[in-house]
Image: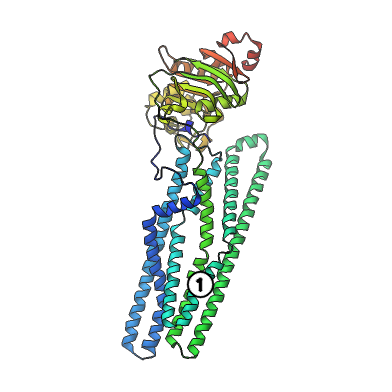
Amino acid sequence: MRTDTEQPRGGGRPPPREDAEPPASAWRLLARALRRNARGAAAVVALLSVWQFSEAMVSVVVGMIIDHAVAAGSSRALLAWGGLLALVFASLMVCYFHGAAGAFRTDQRERHRLRVEIAGHVLRPAGARSGALPGATLSLATADAESAGTLAQPVGYTLASAAAVLGSAVILLRIDLVTGLVVLLGMPLLVALTQFATPAVSRRSRDQLTEVARTSALAADLVRGLRVLRGLGAEDEAVARYRASSRAATAAGIRLAGSHGVLEALSTGLGGLFLAAVTLLAGSRALDGTVSTGDLVAIVGLTQFLAVPLRALGRTGEQVGSAYAAASRIAEFLATPPLLAAGDGVAPGSAAGLSLEDVTAGALRGFSLASRPGELLCLVVPDPAATGTLVRVLAGEIHGAALDGQVLLDGTPLAALSLHDRNRRLLVNPRHAHLLHGTLRGNLDPGGRHADAALARFLDAAAAQDVAALDGKGLDQPVAAGGTTYSGGQRQRVALARALAADPPVLVLDHPTTAVDAVTEQRIGAGIRALRHAPASDRTTWIVTTSPALLGAADRVVVVRDGRVRAEGTHRELTADRDYRELVLR
């Protein structure tokens, strides 16, 4: 995933992250989420526990009213116990409202943190070597972040339910020892049995999230290439591919729903049988006079109440499984290595030199090339694989064991430079122009460093003045996501103007004019030379191209075949070679 070449210039650093190192596993990610939300989660647990305890006390207080007010015929006792019942209901409502709101607020905050962390991992200066399509990354930042960030609610309700069950058991023990012991001993066994389907839920939840992410990535890819698909008449094939992917996601969702159904059936069925058994036991105890009528009402009420916390406890495994599945995908993504290697060095001096020394990587074989400061150098590379390798090497994306040889920027190895210094001095502009949603001004000058007159010069050098004139708003005209309101040539020229506006000492352009006509290429070649290579300028520009107009504007042209430099000279000199003419003359 290319991320470095699209960023604003000027050495901007990403916002600080709360954790310097990403969590190495799903459990650590979930534990970190609980740790950094501990205060909010504790408040949620306390409030929801009071709510559940108040729910349990309703039956107890009603039983007390029957025994101490109704049976005794005391109006004063009825008012007193009735007032207590009103307080219990007030506590119930207030604590539930604030507990549920706190759980929602805490979960939203954690989801936000996860989304920001995922975006920060992609957008950090070093990039992320994840290989994930944009749609899949978007799915991580939405569906997965929502699942993994939903912690306060399940934790709060689970612990509150456990507290309610234990509190109810204590009350039952005080009312009737036998009934209380049955509840206290039977419920742990019941909760354990309801976790039977938990492993399947976790596994199928991960499968479902993976299929949804794959479908989202395919949808985003198809939407981006819609014009191309229509031009090729391949809409039916695209629809068939998406239908197959969507069916796979649907099947995964159905399998997950089946596991949820089994878990729900176990929780509801076993819980119902257990509660029925407790009710029968309490009824028999009332018949033989062991407990009073009020106690029987309290026991039956508590037994009915316990259905809710027992169901919540039964769903704990399901919630943990879903959160774990999402967290494992996020942790795996956050653990991907950086796209770029970086040191802490600074390029010495003000010279703008770029050189490769005996570089072997991918399609390059012993590739050596150096340019002097101020040179406009064009490279003719007929092999697309060699072009891709060369651009990735210059961008610093190929490094370490994958790279043999050295890439030097101002005499310093590229990998030894800090990302800040590298970005300040070198820009590798990708072949595929991507414009961001916003305005033309925002795309040309993300940092807001240039006045309108300067932006006009950059547009002129890229032969893109007509784009600014498309709308009466000029530089403030809106730009759709991906620049879809512009033609391919317009997008390419705006992207070129953006690269020129960055004004790096060393600029590498990968086929910057493939979507424009020959006349416009002539203007662009002259514009780049006038802007960056005036007399006494030390700016260096490398252009990978086969455009005669750009080649004619170059100080030197280098021909690369079989991964090596095979010829060099001016464009005029090289046209004497028939192979060169076949490559570049149109």
Residue 443 falls in which quadrant of the image?
top left
Asked if residue 284 can be seen in this view, the reply is yes
Q: Is residue 573 above or below residue 2?
A: above
Amino acid at pointer 1: Met
Residue 517 falls in which quadrant of the image?
top right
Q: Position of residue 221 (x, y in %)?
A: 59, 40
Residue at 38% across / 65% down in the picture?
Answer: 47
Q: Is residue 445 above or below residue 179?
A: above
| Quarter that holds the C terminus | top right
Q: Which residue is mark 1?
A: 187
- What scheme was used to colour the molecule? rainbow
Q: In the visual, does 260 lie left or right of 3?
A: right
Q: Nearer the viewer, residue 554 or 586?
A: 554
Q: In the visual, does 326 lie left or right of 10?
A: right
Q: Nearer the viewer, residue 40 or 278?
A: 278
Q: Position of residue 283 (x, y in %)?
A: 51, 85
Q: Nearer the viewer, residue 486 or 21?
A: 21
Q: Is residue 149 above or below residue 68?
A: above
Q: Nearer the viewer, residue 225 or 16?
A: 16
Q: Residues within 10 Å of mark 1 (few under 14, many from 20)?
A: many
Q: Is residue 255 above or below residue 369?
A: below
Q: How many marks?
A: 1
Q: Position of residue 166 (x, y in %)?
A: 44, 72
Q: Secondary structure at mark 1?
A: helix
Asked if residue 300 can be seen in this view, the reply is no
Q: Position of residue 181 (x, y in %)?
A: 47, 78
